Amino acid sequence: MKIFKSKEFYKNLAFVAFLAIVLIPNPVGKELKVLVSKLRVMVLNPSVESTDNQKQLSKFDYEWKLVDANGKQVELSDFSGKVILLNYWATWCPPCVAEMPSLQKLYNDYQDKMVFIFLTNDDKPKVDAFMKKRDLTLPVYFQHSKAPAKLFTSSLPTTYLIDQNGKILIEEVGASDWNGTSMRDILDKLLVE
């Protein structure tokens, strides 16, 4: 049969198999999605918004209530005047999982210089198990009140970098390399201001 000897047949078969793995919800499909997202992370670096596109948080935006992993309630205003990296993520989100190692490395080096908020809507036991399994020490928070409009998103992952004056310098949707030289340069500049 000539059809089975065609290179196009095998290319199409491989493509269909790839789609099946990606689209079928199973552990193999999830890990493949994480792998594809990691490839994206390797090439994408967050960048600062143009001045015209930067949003400014108001004092009302800072009234947003969060709960940390220990159950302590905080407001965003508790971090006012500091550089804040706010990351929306979920344990079931392959792009979130893919960018976590770069965020962990950034956190390891900058945790004493700025505020990190890793916000999730997942259940705490699931989050705790995820963090332990992946050996992550990122500070996890849960929403206690509705997010202000300027920081609301339904896309995962989404990360905001907010300067000391409440200006949103970066609004990045999708997985990125947060531990790259360009991000470190941005932070180092911000932290000396």
Image (cartoon, rainbow, N blue to C red):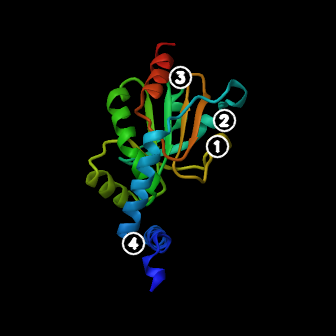
Taking 55 as reference, is 156 left or right? left
Find residue 124 and report its image quarter.
bottom left
Q: Rounded to the nearest whole Å, what is the CA distance between mark 3 and mark 2?
A: 15 Å
Q: Secondary structure at mark 3?
A: loop
Q: Earlier in the sequence, mark 1 or mark 4?
A: 4
Label 1 close to label 2 by CB (< 8 Å)? yes
How far apart are the alpha carbons under marks 4 and 2? 43 Å
- The Cα atoms of the two marked residues, 1 and 2, are separated by 8 Å
Are there few (<14), some (14-19), or many (20+) residues within 10 Å of tag 1?
some
Q: Which residue is tagged 4?
A: 26
SS label for mark 1:
loop
Question: Where is residue 14 shown, x and y percent of the image?
Answer: 44, 70
Q: Which is closer to the viewer, label 3 or label 4? A: 4
- Please, is residue 65 above or below residue 31 in the view? above
The reply, left or right, for residue 6 in relation to residue 165 is left
Q: According to the image, label 3 marks what residue?
A: 81
Question: How dense is the environment of label 4, judged by Cα within 10 Å: few (below 14), some, or many (20 and up)?
Answer: few
Query: Residue 148 — which label?
Result: 1
Quadrant in which the N terminus is drawn: bottom left
Residue under the point 34% across and 60% down: 125
